[in-house]
């Protein structure tokens, strides 16, 4: 592959797909319409593959298969609205499409030229019709850099990626720049690692770039993404795998490595499939392998599948797993830049970090620095989940407030409930209370309030969530995922979980809260790796902002959120009960008794607090207290 050939592929492909960005049809294109269908994990689980098959069948049946192109893309972001279909050149956004809708879209929209109003996306908060992405509240405050091609290109066609400047950055680096110049650009850009710690990417590359002689070196990618509710890296791998390949090759050129490894969890089959296709396509075009762009630079890469161990998100444990050993962390120093995979100097970044690099090379450090805050440059991708209207994937400039993400982009809290807290950073992060909703999302601001950026999971909680139970949930996860190598993490987290279980079971005693806090601080300062060092964060942050809930559990034997079953009673209000007997009939354990047309009662010794009676009562007579 030469630079001229790369430009030729772009010139040939871009006119055919330009409508996805410009919403206009170039004269050279053979297609009058393009139908983009989300092929990410979320939409695939909702049946988008069958939808694609039906579109092919319908356009063939109507004899317009030469006029309409069907494109399977990556994630558009609004995951809960899948399957999503966008019809170009108009750019009309159809949400939650079914197979039955396909015939209508083909006949009424593509052939008839009429937008189908009842299938078009309606804003959940206002009910307004929003035909295009640019009109939707969900996208207005976003700035898609890492996700720039997700939902735009066909991830299984390298030509699509090349059409939107793909591999131009790699060509520029190997033909026009020295490794030192690339490092200077990365340092000047201020890009920090998006995997959680926020270490400057350029500095990491600089440390590994020394000793460029005959020393074997490696470039690695962390695509493990073990945080509950996180799917940022998965979406990039599924929707834009070539951005990762290009960036890793650039990193290889900078540090003098000719081999790369992408560590991806085996639970990501679509991501693994598309990354495999992309690697093979890049090899065939000479964008991986020997003498890339005739520069004398060699680089190739392989996929390594992880078994889903959370600890393998820690860099030294990940490298140990790549080597074929049990994923356990190693003491640092020496750091991976000196002694990494197979004992050789290694650079490791996560998928999102790499996805930014080609754009920084092409657009310059000043462009990237213009986005974000003074100490946190660029954008950050978040996976929104929990009690929020718009579940999905968003990318916002650093410095955007928590309030803007949750309410302006996420649509707020459903069912009229009150916002209570947001968990960032997964099991390693902390909970942000309502009083700190205006906190800017950047590395330093989140650390200052006891949370952290993490890889980008953002779980929203409302008034019905018990913060003690939330802390217990995340601690259960870290106890299960601890590799067991060091005593503070292996034993200390178990003791913390025992105390939390005791408190939520209504058996808490005076001194338990203080003991829990002391244990958390000890584990935080004495564990070997990042898993143990951050495992107490959910407990410490909830103690910091919701200590009154802990005290209510311990001293009043009461769960203010009505969540912890052993601290609850389900009762029937005799003034509201009509004696219909429906609750008695629905109760799975026979705990409710009474006579028709008289108030019923619940035997607390039998009640399992399942809530079936509450949901079945038509008079609102049953409640938890």
Image (tube, grey):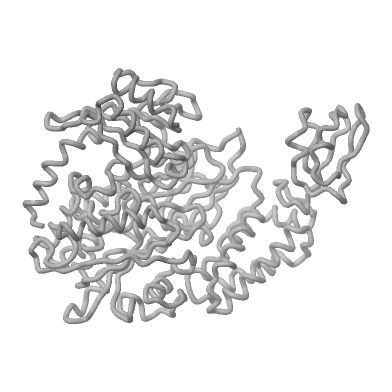
Number of marks in picture: 0
Instruction: Describe residue 268's horizontal placement relative to residue 5 as left or right.
Output: right
Q: In the rendered view of the protein, which quadrant contains the N terminus?
A: bottom left
Q: In the picture shown, does residue 440 fall above or below 333?
A: above
Name the residue at the front extreme. 61
- Determine if residue 448 is in view: no
Q: Residue at x 88, y 32 (%)?
A: 574
Q: Residue 62 at what x, y percent from top left?
A: 29, 24
Instruction: Describe residue 576's horizontal placement relative to residue 174 as left or right.
Output: right
Residue nearest the observer in this picture, 439 or 272 = 272
Q: Residue at x 91, y 26 (%)?
A: 597
Residue nearest the observer in this picture, 533 or 301 = 301
Q: Residue 26 at what x, y percent from top left?
A: 15, 30
Q: Within the image, what quadrant is residue 3 found in? A: bottom left
- Determine if residue 599 is in view: yes
Q: In the rendered view of the protein, which quadrant contains the C terminus?
A: top right
Q: Within the image, what quadrant is residue 345 found in? A: bottom left
Q: Residue 539 at what x, y percent from top left?
A: 61, 61
Q: In the picture shown, does residue 331 fall above or below 109?
A: below
Q: Residue 315 at what x, y percent from top left?
A: 40, 70
Q: In the picture shown, does residue 414 fall above or below 32?
A: below
Instruction: Describe residue 597's horizontal placement relative to residue 122 as left or right.
Output: right
Q: In the picture shown, does residue 95 fall above or below 310?
A: above
């Amino acid at each position: 592959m030469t630079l001229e050939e790369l430009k030729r592929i772009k010139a040939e492909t871009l006119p055919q797909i330009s409508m996805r960005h410009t919403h206009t049809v170039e004269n050279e294109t053979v297609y009058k319409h393009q139908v983009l269908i989300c092929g990410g994990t979320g939409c695939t689980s909702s049946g988008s593959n069958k939808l694609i098959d039906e579109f092919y069948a319908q356009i063939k049946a109507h004899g317009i298969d030469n006029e309409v192109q069907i494109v399977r893309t990556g994630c558009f972001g609004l995951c809960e609205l899948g399957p999503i279909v966008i019809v170009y050149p108009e750019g009309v956004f159809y949400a939650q499409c079914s197979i039955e809708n396909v015939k209508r879209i083909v006949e009424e929209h593509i052939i008839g030229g009429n937008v189908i109003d009842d299938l078009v996306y309606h804003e959940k908060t206002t009910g307004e019709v929003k035909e295009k992405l640019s009109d939707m509240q969900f996208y207005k405050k976003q700035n898609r850099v890492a996700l720039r091609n997700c939902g735009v290109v066909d991830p299984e066609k390298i030509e699509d990626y090349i059409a939107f400047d793909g591999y131009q950055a790699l060509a520029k680096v190997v033909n026009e720049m020295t490794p030192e110049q690339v490092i200077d650009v990365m340092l000047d850009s201020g890009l920090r690692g998006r995997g959680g710690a926020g270490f400057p990417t350029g500095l990491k590359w600089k440390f590994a770039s020394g000793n460029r002689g005959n020393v074997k070196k490696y470039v690695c990618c962390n695509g493990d993404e073990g945080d509950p509710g996180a799917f940022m890296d998965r979406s990039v791998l599924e929707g834009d795998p070539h951005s990762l390949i290009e960036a890793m090759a650039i990193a290889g050129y900078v540090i003098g490595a000719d081999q790369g490894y992408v560590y991806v969890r085996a639970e990501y089959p679509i991501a693994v499939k598309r990354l495999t296709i992309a690697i093979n396509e890049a090899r065939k075009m000479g964008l991986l392998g020997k003498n890339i762009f005739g520069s004398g630079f060699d680089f190739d890469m392989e996929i390594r599948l992880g078994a889903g161990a959370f600890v393998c998100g820690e860099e030294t444990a990940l490298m140990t797993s790549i080597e074929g050993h049990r994923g356990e962390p190693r003491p640092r120093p020496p750091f991976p830049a000196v002694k990494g995979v197979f004992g050789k100097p290694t650079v490791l970044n996560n998928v999102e970090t790499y996805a930014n690099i080609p754009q920084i090379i092409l657009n310059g450090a000043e462009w990237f620095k213009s986005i974000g805050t003074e100490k946190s440059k660029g954008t950050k991708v978040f996976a929104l989940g929990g009690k929020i209207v718009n579940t999905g994937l968003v990318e916002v400039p650093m410095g955007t407030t928590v309030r803007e993400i949750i309410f302006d982009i996420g649509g707020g809290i459903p069912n009229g409930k009150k916002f209570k807290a947001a968990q960032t950073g997964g099991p390693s992060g902390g909970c942000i209370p309502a009083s700190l909703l205006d906190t800017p999302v950047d590395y330093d601001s989140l650390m200052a309030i006891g949370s952290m950026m993490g890889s980008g999971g953002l779980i929203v909680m409302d008034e019905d969530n018990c913060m003690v139970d939330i802390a217990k949930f995340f601690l259960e996860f870290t106890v299960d995922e601890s590799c067991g190598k060091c005593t503070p993490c292996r034993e200390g987290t178990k003791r913390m979980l025992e105390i939390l279980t005791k408190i939520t079971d209504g058996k808490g005693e005076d001194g338990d809260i203080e003991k829990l806090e002391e244990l958390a601080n000890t584990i935080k300062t004495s564990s070997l790796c990042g898993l143990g060092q951050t495992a107490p964060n959910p407990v410490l942050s909830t103690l910091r902002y919701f200590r009154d809930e802990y005290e209510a559990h311990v001293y009043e034997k009461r769960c203010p959120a009505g969540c912890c079953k052993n601290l609850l009673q389900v009762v029937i209000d005799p003034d509201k009960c009509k004696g219909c007997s429906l609750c008695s009939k629905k109760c799975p354990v026979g705990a409710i008794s009474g006579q028709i047309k008289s108030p019923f009662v619940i035997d607390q010794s039998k009640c399992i607090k399942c809530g079936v009676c509450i949901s079945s009562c038509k008079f609102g007579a049953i409640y938890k207290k």
